[in-house]
Amino acid sequence: MKKSIYGLTRDQLIEWLLENGQKKFRAEQVWDWLYIKRVQSFSDMKNVSKDCIQLLEDNFVIQTLKESVKQESEDGTIKFLFEMEDGNLIETVLMRFKYGLSVCVTTQVGCNIGCSFCASGLLKKNRDLDAGEIVGQIMKVQEHLDNMQKDERVSHIVVMGIGEPFDNYKNLMNFLRVVNDQKGLAIGARHITVSTSGLAKKIVDFANENIQVNLAVSLHAPNDELRTKIMVINKAFPIEKVMEAIDYYLETTNRRITFEYILLKDVNDHVEEAQQLARLLENKRHLSYVNLIPYNPVDEHSQYQRSSQESIDAFFQALKKKGINCGVRLEQGTDIDAACGQLRSKQIKKEKVSK
């Protein structure tokens, strides 16, 4: 199967066209048609020579995703289920905020991290997405916005969909460079956040990229015993190793880091855990923010329930009392399978039943 041309950064596109006998300015033209005019066919690139168009058609396609299901929430959140050329399904979510339109993208088909509370990991990893398939999610959402004729654009990106982004590092970085390119989509690096479950070595690599993209770490517990119970990845990268990598990241970038913390009733939501978390982050307070996330129950993980509002408030206040910057995540799309991976999982089950 031909790969999507969206997978090439502008520099890679220039290099590829030069290697194939084209002039550098052709790459600039093609890039403009892809990301500013947003055409769906190479033949629509009116000022590009016929031989260049033929070359592109022989080697690439533009879009490799097909919309399979679209669910719209009462709050304006839209969840897309996209089918890829090999038949695999992925989820992408468009969220509306006061500051702009944010898209949550997927980086893998399934997930092997094994968080015991997560719907995304219900189906094991099948494969990585290539960079073109990740960029393609943004382009499909932007196509939806263009068709609505409201002159809206994707302004923010969170890489928090299905899969572990740092387990697909090379394709992730190409994706970031494509969407951040100032001659294309021009989505600011500070408007992009990548979330990891704590792959310590990749956190160090990311610190060395010299890119101002935000980093979020899914922590969810303040000690190894508890974190290992709910996140198997902690066996490979215990909290001490993760914190060493984070210290390096903070020293290298001097950029604030977000710690994601899902509150599970009677599991990790006690004031005691809040105090442990505060001690863990004590020397990082000036560059740390804790994002407290009310849990969205998943049928397959019935052992977990949402913390009470009283427990959420007490946890929040315990952190604030210790000087930790924190907040409770605003919930969106709760009426359309809000948990990451739910829509995909239900669709696959439906297909199996129909067969």
Image (cartoon, rainbow, N blue to C red):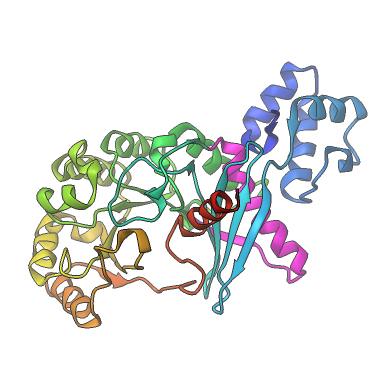
Q: Nearer the viewer, residue 112 or 140?
A: 112
Asked whether 150 falls inside the magenta stretch, the response is yes
- Predominant secondary structure in magenta? helix
- Judged left or right of residue 66, residue 175 is left
- In the image shown, does 183 or 6 lie closer to the viewer? 6
Left-right relation of 4 to 233: right
Quadrant including the N terminus? top right
Residue 285 location in percent, x, y? 19, 60
Residue 19 place in picture, x, y as percent: 72, 16
The residue at the far bottom in this view is 310
Residue 17, percent from left and from top = 74, 24
In the rendered view, does 105 fall on the left or right side of 252? right
Q: Is residue 205 magenta?
A: no
Q: Which residues are magenta?
A: 129-158
Who is closer to the viewer here, 273 or 336?
Answer: 336
Q: What is the number of callouts on the image?
A: 0
Residue depicted at 28% across the width and 33% down the height? 201
